[in-house]
Each structure stands twice: as C-alpha cells, then as structure tokens.
Image (cartoon, helix red, strand yellow):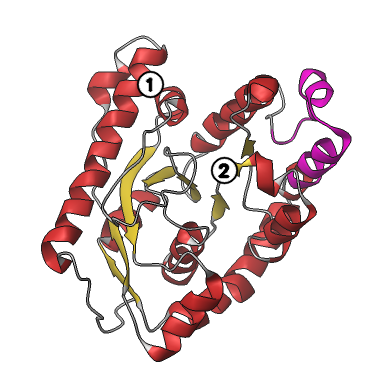
Amino acid sequence: MSRSLVDAPLPDEVREILTPWERANLEIALRMNREPAKAFWTQVQRVFGAAFVRLLTRNVVRDYGFEHLREAYQRGSVLLVANHRTHFDMFVVSSLIHRRLPGRKRLYFPVIGQYYYQSFGGMALNQLLAWWSMFPPLFALPTHAVVDRYSLDVLSELCARGPGTILGIHPEGGRNLNPDPWSFMRCQPGTGKIIHTARPTVLPVFITGLHPHLPSQVKRNWTGGESARIRIGPPVDLREHFALPGKGSTYKRIVDDVMGRVRDLAEEDRAEFGDTPQDVPDRSG
C-alpha cells in the first residue's frame, strides 16, 4: 500500500521547482502536518490559538448556521468554501470549531504561497498564529504549476480522510478589497477539482465585518463597531456534477454552484443588515 502524500517525502519534481527557501518552508510544514506532530499542534491551536482569537473578537462576532457544520462533522470530511475579505477570516472560523466541536479534529487551510512560503514573516505567522495549519501552499504562478498540482493532490487526499478532518478554502484566491462587503471576485476552478476527486461534504460560508487591519479589529472588539458575521449554509448537493468527467469545465461548474450558495448567504446578510451594518450582541458562545 502506497504512503499518503503527507507522509511521503516531497517529490523530486516539486523540490526541483522550488527555491531553497521555499523548499525548506514547505518541507517543515509537511513534517508539522504529519502525525504525531499534527496532533500536538492541533492541541496547541485549540488551547492557545482559539482562546486568543476568542479574546480579540468575542464582543463583535456573530454566527449563523453552525449546526450545519456540527452535523456534517460527524459524518465525514468537511470542506468549508468561503469568500475572502481579510487575513483573519479562517482564524475566527477555526476558533469556533475548536470551541464547539468535540473529539479529534485536524484543520487545514491552504494559502497563497507567495507570502506564507516565500517570506520569513509569512512562515512565522504560519507557525506562531496558525500552528502550521496554513497548508499546503498554492502559488498560482506559471513557474510553480507542478507545485500547485502537488498541493491539489494533497488537498484531495486530506478531503477523503473522514470524520474529524476539516478544510477551509477561498476559491477567490486573493482577498477581495472591494468596499462592498457583499461583492465577490472571480473564482478559480482548483476547488472544483478537489471536490470532484475527494467528494467531501461541502458547506458554503460567508464572512463579513472583520476589519482588514488587525490593530483596528482588536480596538473594535473593545470600543464597538461593525459586527463580524459568519454564516454557514447547509451541505451543497453536488451529485449531478460527480457523474460528469473530471475536466476543467466540470470543476468550474462545481465552483460556480458552491459559490452561488455563498452568494445566497451574502444576500441573506444584506437583507438583514442593509448598507449600514449595525452592532449586535455577542452570540458566538
């Protein structure tokens, strides 16, 4: 029986593409996401990371639909597909997961490699704030196409691991800096390939209201300001897409379908909060 990609050494064709610094960063992250290291870092994330995020956001975070994640989590691997507004979106989501879901958990959040795997600051953030869960990297560069194919294969493998495995991904790729909180950017089809290959339970997630600058978000938590809202929808039924061949057009249809559900959640948020979001009491538990 072949070893999983996470447990196996970095393939030679991937090593050859990466710079020495990129290669060192990816190999460290790969080791930190193997057992038993992953179990250790998950506990650190649960005890320290989730508590720290909770401390900085507890007065402004409001969530809806967490019961969908709780139910899906018990049945198998879960892929959270979300819009992307700030660097902190998935930190807040992971804090909720660690506080509310019992039992063994393994969290993975693929990120754009240009910052988190090409700079000292990015790698430090992955270690000290994400506890190595920002893995694997997706560079979205022509020079790194081999690396991205490897990362997509890793994500597909992780998505098929069963109960306790939760991944969060942003098909938009980069952050949406449009001042309209209910707007979306063009999405990439890579997420569709992961879903078509591994067939996890897919939940749409809409996140808005977090300030893009950490000091301002921390200040808002204590002085008041716009609420940060997380909306989780029910599982997306993608069976009709799974009957189609694995190719680019199929992957795009899957992404468009899932992101359509994320847009539905955005419209629910717009209907409730209008063009001037208001402060709300804490309901994040």
Label number found at residue 118: none
Residue 129 shows in this picture: yes
| Residue 19: in magenta span | yes
Residue 139 lies, in percent from the top left, at: 63, 33
Left or right, 67 with respect to 154, comes to left
Query: In the displayed structure, would residue 109 be above or below residue 41?
Result: above
Residue 72 lies, in percent from the top left, at: 33, 49
Q: Which residue does the image show at 61% across and 75% down from the upper left? A: 47
Q: Earlier in the sequence, mark 2 or mark 1?
A: 2
Is the C terminus in the top left, top right, bottom left or bottom right quadrant? bottom left
Left or right, 151 with respect to 86, comes to right
The residue at which mark 2 appears reads as 110
The magenta segment: 6-29
Left or right, 131 with respect to 51, comes to right
Q: Which residue does the image show at 47% across and 27% down from the upper left? A: 190
Residue 133 lies, in percent from the top left, at: 62, 53
Looking at the picture, tell me which residue is in the foreground, 239 or 277.
Answer: 277
Left or right, 281 with respect to 198, comes to left
Magenta residues, dominant SS class: helix
Q: Quadrant of residue 126?
A: bottom right
Residue 10 lies, in percent from the top left, at: 79, 29
Is the N terminus in the top left, top right, bottom left or bottom right quadrant? top right
Looking at the picture, tell me which residue is in the foreground, 119 or 147.
Answer: 119
Label number found at residue 251: 1
| Residue 236: in magenta span | no
Q: Which residue does the image show at 75% across and 43% down from the upper left? A: 118
Q: Amino acid at mark 2?
A: Pro
Q: Which residue does the image show at 49% across and 36% down from the upper left? A: 159
